[in-house]
Amino acid sequence: MRKRLLATIAVTAVTAVTALTAVSGLMSGAAQAADPIKVGAIVSATGPASFLGDPEKKVLELYADRINKAGGVDGRPLQLTIYDDGGAADKAASFTKRLIESDGVDVIVGGTTTAATMAAVPLVERAGVPFISLAGAVVIVEPVKKWVFKTPHTDRMAAEKVMEDMKKRGFTKLALLSEDSGFGKSGRDQTLAVAKERGIELVADETYGAKDTDVTAQLTKVKNNAAAQAVLVFGLGQGPAVVTKNYRQLGISLPLYQSHGVASKEYIRLAGGAAEGVRLPAAGLVVAAQLADSDPQKKVVTEFTKVYEDSFNSEVSTFAGHAYDGLMIALDAVKRAGGTDKAKLRDAIEQTKGYVGTGGTVTMSAKDHMGLTLDAFHMVEVKQGDWALVK
């Protein structure tokens, strides 16, 4: 009897342990399924590039919240960690290191400026963390870097689009004014290269500082250059607005082009009436309502514009769109990779095909870590304080 009782107790104990192990396994699986997708971001929400970085920050927070309320991605919530580098490259590097080493993020979306992005690049390359930049310079993705991608059109594409428009208007002689910054320097280099290819003669080559409050000295040289037929400014932040105001104050009548670094209503507000008539290449997002109904972007940019403007009671900008595209490309890759294994996630980002975003239709490859063509750019002009699509 005693032996039978002990045997029964032993069987019961084994059964209990087996049951607990099974429950523990289920709980472990449930916990694993609910592990957050850790998305890190570095943006310039304050400082000289704040009108780029602030909308980026807002979009990342807005859509992380919307996605979590909808149940996350494959049942996993998003855990978003954002740092503001204030436009300083050294801070961007420090925050990138923190995201990788302390926060243990699965992917990084950000790098508002070219300088901030390039400060982060060696860190993500060394650590093997997928990084989707929101900055414009072509140097970010050319040459291709294994772990680095980007969403905006490049400065090279901007130069190509401007010169394409110049040729249509019969202009072949260009005066260039570029900002002494990562984006401006790269833009200058690309403009010089594209000009040779497109048969455009560069007749003036001036620079200005990102924090300059007056550039009349440089613009006076441009004004006195009898050969110049059009002027291109390559910069971002407040600098291009200062240039635009000084341009009008000097009474320069030549057509004025800006780069996509100012594709925001904030530029028009800062420049005021001086911005009237300025042309620049931009994503379809800034002229969403003017796109043809047959344009595959029309639905995407119209919906995004409504969500953004309803949420923040302010006009949408292309920079907000860059952040949206970066986040959506990353999360779509998580789905296709079946999780957040960094190598598989990197491969899935590189295999992005036919993603229709605010910047255009994205198809990446091992040789192209941006995935946009020149057709994704639209030439726009400031008319009566708003963007108008140049037909």
Image (cartoon, rainbow, N blue to C red):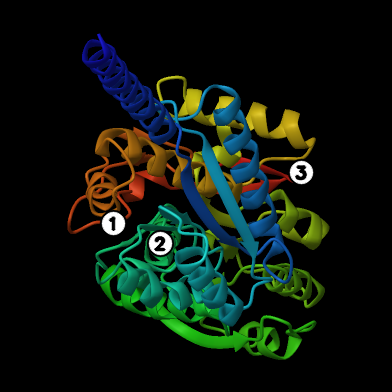
> Is 364 or 18 nearer to us in this picture?
18
Residue pictured at 27% horizontal, 18% vertical = 6
Percent coordinates x, y for residue 385 in the rendering: 76, 46
Vertical comparison of 219 with 302: above or below:
below
**Residue type at numbered disc 2:** Thr
Q: Secondary structure at mark 3?
A: loop
Report which residue position mark 3 lands on. Answer: 384
**Residue type at numbered disc 3:** Gln
CA separation in Å, label 3 and label 2: 28 Å
Foreground mark, 1 or 2, reads 1
- Badge 3, how many Cα within 10 Å: few under 14, some, many 20+? few
Q: Secondary structure at mark 2?
A: loop
- Badge 2, how many Cα within 10 Å: few under 14, some, many 20+? many
Report which residue position mark 1 lands on. Answer: 369
Report which residue position mark 2 lands on. Answer: 154
Foreground mark, 3 or 1, reads 1
Residue pictured at 73% horizontal, 69% vertical = 238
